[in-house]
Image (cartoon, rainbow, N blue to C red):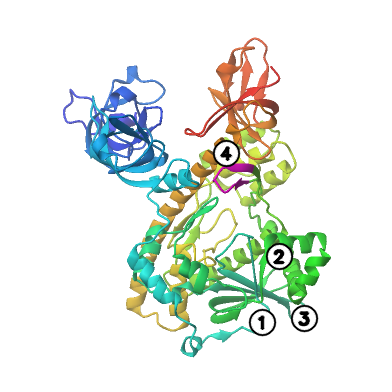
Amino acid sequence: MWYNNIHMKKKSKRPEITGTLSKHRKGFGFVITEEEGEDIYISARSLHGAMDGDLVLVDLIPPPLWGSSPEGIIIKVLKRSTTEVVGTFEKSKKFGFVVPEGKNKGEDVFIRKKDFSGAQRGDKVIAQITRYPDKNNSAEGKITEIISRSGQPGGDIKSLMRSYGLRETFPSRVNAEAKAVSKRGITEEELAGRRDLRDKTIITIDGADSKDFDDAVSAELLPGGNYLLGVHIADVSHYVDEGGYLDQEALKRGNSVYLLDQVVPMLPKKLSNGICSLNPDEDRLTLSVDMEITPQGEVVGHDIYESVIHSKARMVYSDVSDMLEHNDIGLLKQYRDVAEDILIMDRLAKILREKRQQRGSLDFDFDEAYISLDEWGIPTSVDIAERRTANRLIEEFMLLANQTVAEHFFWMEVPFIYRIHEAPAVSKMEELRTFLRGFGITMKGASDGIHPKALNSILQQAAGESYENIISTVMLRSMQKAFYGTECEGHFGLALRFYCHFTSPIRRYPDLMIHRIIKSCLQGNLSEKRMKGFKKKAAEAAEISSMTERQAAELERDVEKMKKAEYMSYHIGEEYDGVISGVTNYGIYVQLENTIEGMIRLDSLWDDYYIYEEEQYRVIGERTHRVYMLGQKVHVVLDSVNIENREINFALEEL
């Protein structure tokens, strides 16, 4: 077995292994090692003062004493990873505790009265650790910052944000640089060499709440029947100097993070909502991609250049969708100056979508939640987020621009950052094949060479069925995670050889980085020395941005789960229809129509003892043979909610 290869100091001793502790909120943990094999389970009594994220030395216990995975005892903490804890302050007269949340889970920190620093019960705080835990004592610390007072709107989200090491605010030197840049007007010197598009009908289409517009579009019919699509992206690199304070901070953040009604921006608002935003009726500097497209969706020519635009309208998705889906006369009159252009865009977007589907591009059209908060930050509704005609229109245009730019600069053989999505692992495809059999769906093709078309066919077969969301979710989880890299390795999900992120430099650092490379090429500044510099910086940006993207996704999920649990806490005892979305040896997961998911614990099913059949994705009653399986419709009642642990518990109403 794998553990037999671990280095042993003496043959008489058990193997000692180095790894990183990932601690569960219930007290136990797992040590993740670089060796191939399973993670090592550590019981709560065997942690010996180690905290989540610590680098530790583990002594494996004898294999006959293991449970379902290797087990060990932490014998030494090699390196501490935590210097401060974010959480909720609980206090008595003489002492208090900070109860952590988010990533720093499970480590209550003892606070002496002299170190309260004015914190009150229920406040969200940061505690600096002054003494690490040992076998007999918990960690000790002092409060260094009060994030928000008890009950303050948005305090729970701010606290989670800080637990991930993120801040809404920027360092003073970054703000000073942003302020200086934002005061600059567009000069004639800056316009020199740029193509003037200010007379063209160019518009932005975004969400109603959007304030930073980094992409604008134009479309027209050419003589002969081809289309000319223009995608015009804010020239953020013109204002963010390479290596400056703004640039350093943007690279560190990697991307903007959107947390319901709060945002952790990559760039200060003076830029993102100001000089860099393609606001209507204002001149703005841009990088443009023009693409000539046939009625069959083929790009037969393209041009990439620096430009200046003057957006004619700030459109919102809902209005454009109403115009296109319902022929809304009022909106068509209101936007009569751009209505014809929007109709051309709609026809072109449908052509591009059809072309993409023929290629085999995957389109996971599963429901996503839209959570509404009131002025106090309390969730008032959880609905399905709209993904209508206008949303899809902009999506198609951005996909094509990203593809066109990636291919162009690949053939130029310059340093670049590509968006990479590798083919799924064979083992994952075998698991998916088995899973689909339970729904009577056959996956075509060999698992070691699966084509996106085969997976798209499955999504189409499941469309409209009660289990559609389940199949989409399981298939997505079977995919590799997309990431940024400097080698053009293709995008499996989009069925593309060439792909990058070019269209959002306000909120994604890779886009900003490749804008610099593009402009150096356009301006003829790509010397050998510059090429070497870009190669190094592109690799650094790709690595950091891939990491910050994963962190942002994890935080966004945490916030969504927290607010869904809070919303459901106001509806205890209410009944719902749902679909079984997961089956485990301890419970059945049920997803409601609005995407909220909760669990029915098997030990709460009093009518029988239920046996978990993993390969069939079901549980079956030992005596009654009653079956609960993935995709099955059920009627449930909301039994209980634990907001702190993001847990929602249902009971089966049929019993």
Tell me the residue that label 4 is attached to.
564
Front residue of this view, candidates 583 and 163: 163
Q: Quadrant of the C terminus?
A: top right
Q: Quadrant of residue 240?
A: bottom left
Amino acid type of the residue tagged 4 in the rendering:
Lys
Q: Nearer the viewer, mark 3 or mark 1?
A: 1
Amino acid type of the residue tagged 2 in the rendering:
Ala
Locate residue 108 relative to residue 570 in the image: left or right. Answer: left
Q: Nearer the viewer, mark 4 or mark 1?
A: 4
Q: CA distance from mark 4 to mark 1?
A: 45 Å
Instruction: Name the secondary structure under disc 2.
Output: helix
**Residue 387: image x %, image y %?**
68, 54
Q: Which mark is residue 224?
A: 3
Counting residues from the N terminus, which is met first, the one under dot 4 or under dot 2?
A: 2
Counting residues from the N terminus, which is met first, the one under dot 4 or under dot 1?
A: 1
- The answer to whether residue 304 is seen in the rendering is yes
Locate residue 262 relative to residue 364 in the image: left or right. Answer: left
Tell me the residue that label 2 is attached to.
349
Q: CA distance from mark 2 to mark 1?
A: 20 Å
Q: Read off the magenta span.
A: 369-381
Q: Are marks 3 and 2 in contact (CB under 8 Å)?
A: no
